[in-house]
Image: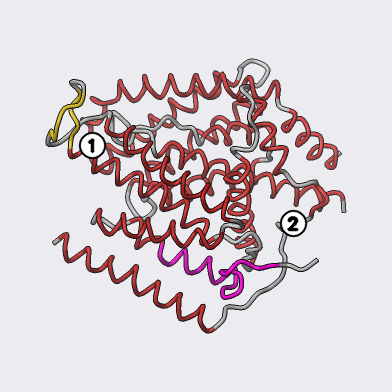
Amino acid sequence: MQITHKLPEIHFSPVMLFIHGFCILPAFIFQKVLLFRVFQTILFIFLSLFHASSSVDKRKQLVFSFFSFLFILVFNMLTPHGEVLFTLFNFPVTLGAINTGIFKATVFTGLLALSKITIAKNLSLPGPAGKMVSKVFYYFGELKEVQGKYKTKDIIKRIDLILLSITPPPDTGDSVPIEQKLKTSRAGILLICISLFFHWGIFILSLYIAK
Amino acid sequence: MKKQKSISFQSNIVALLAACCIFLSAFEYIIPKPIPFLRIGLANLPILIGITLLPFPAFLLLICMKVCFQGLIYGTFFSHIIILSAGGTFSSSIAMFFLYKFCKKYISFIGISVTGALLSNTVQLYLAGLLFFGPSVWLISPPFYIIGGIAGLLLGVFTNTFTGKSMWLTQCRELLYADNS
């Protein structure tokens, strides 16, 4: 059977993707300028589409990101604070609540997309601690994938089915499934450098704007 | 060989529970809070389940990972708030672990969880007073204790039901303890 690789798998090794994600994580989390944060989130969502296996998967991913963003925004608007922009059915819609909502929504959707870009299924970090971190991210990825798969009203049964489906048999050994060792191409290294400069560049710029 | 297999399975369970902590932390992050720093503590659910499955060193590893990953998700990893989070998590988790190990005949998961929640709040308020607010921090303690107690109660009820019904938990226990015997 012929194995077809997704675009990121051709140019980047899983370890390099992990290092790249880990390096840009602080530049995203500590970004205080909302506009930059929104832009970074959109970029992460766009890049995460390259990791999707089919066009249906891509569409699902986009719809999920959009609705989770909207849901968090609306949910946070229920706690009004700051300047009142307008009232909707006697409920004050405030600037502070919108800002908080967008801030939290970008963190949630942005981090989910970033983890999709960063954590390849065949990631294997060196050393015992690295192995443990790889395993945690592997299971996190599995949890994200299977969480919508089981549709039963009994929440306990649903959690049980999810856990049963991702728990490996005891004879699996100490490591999570690893396909093969891939190397990062020259184009891949160049793209990673551009990405690092970009994210840290706008982070430094945001520090000047905040002043 | 059997022991080796059991250790590797145990490390897989630690990683799986840590991943559940990250997942629930991310979910809790989106819920708006009436009081800043106040959390329901959904990520304590894997910790409560871990108590029934893991030996103390593996359980400590799970707590460390929960604190670190939660800090990364909330963006507090490089701030003072991680000290409050670590203090609360370590004190409550260790207390819950020993309560389960030595008093499980006399106390249910509801009691264990409520004790953990109240202890976590006490340690966090003490540290917050010590580091930021001074003694006046105790003035804001009533809502913390009330909400913490209710959240602890709900998590305890859920864990009681889950540990009674879960096939996964039974299977994990069998695999972990059959290999050790």
Residue A31: image location, x then y, percent: 29, 58
- The image position of residue B45, as x and y in percent, is 55, 32
Is label 1 in a helix, a strand or a loop? helix
Number of the front mark, 1 or 2: 1
Q: Name the quadrant of the C terminus of chain B.
A: top right
Image location of residue B24, percent across then percent down: 50, 38
Residues at discs 1 and 2 both on one chain: yes
At x 43%, y 67%, the residue is A23
Question: Residue beneath label 1, please?
Answer: A97
Q: Looking at this view, name the residue that lies furthest to the bottom.
A: A186
Residue A42 spot, x, y in % from top left: 37, 57
Camera-nearest residue between A131 and A163: A163
Tell me which label, 1 or 2, sits earlier in the chain: 1
The chain to which mark 1 is attached is A
Magenta range is A4-24
Q: At 44% from the left edge and 46% from the top edge, which residue is drawn?
A: A65
Camera-nearest residue between A154 and B140: A154
How many C-alpha atoms fall within 10 Å of the one at disc 1: few (<14), some, or many (≥20)? Answer: many
Residue A127 image-quadrant placement: bottom right
Task: Specify whether residue A18 is painted magenta.
Answer: yes
Mark 2 lies on residue: A174
B37 relative to A192, above or below: above
Identify the main secondary structure in magenta. Answer: helix
Q: Amino acid at mark 2?
A: Asp
Q: Quadrant of the N terminus of chain B?
A: bottom right
Question: Residue B149 lies in what quarter of the image?
Answer: top left
| Amino acid type of the residue tagged 1 in the rendering | Ala
Above or below, B110 relative to B49: above
Q: What residue is shown at x 71% (from left), y 63% (from top)?
A: A178
Instruction: Name the subunit of mark 2.
Output: A
The residue closer to the viewer here, B46 or A57, is A57
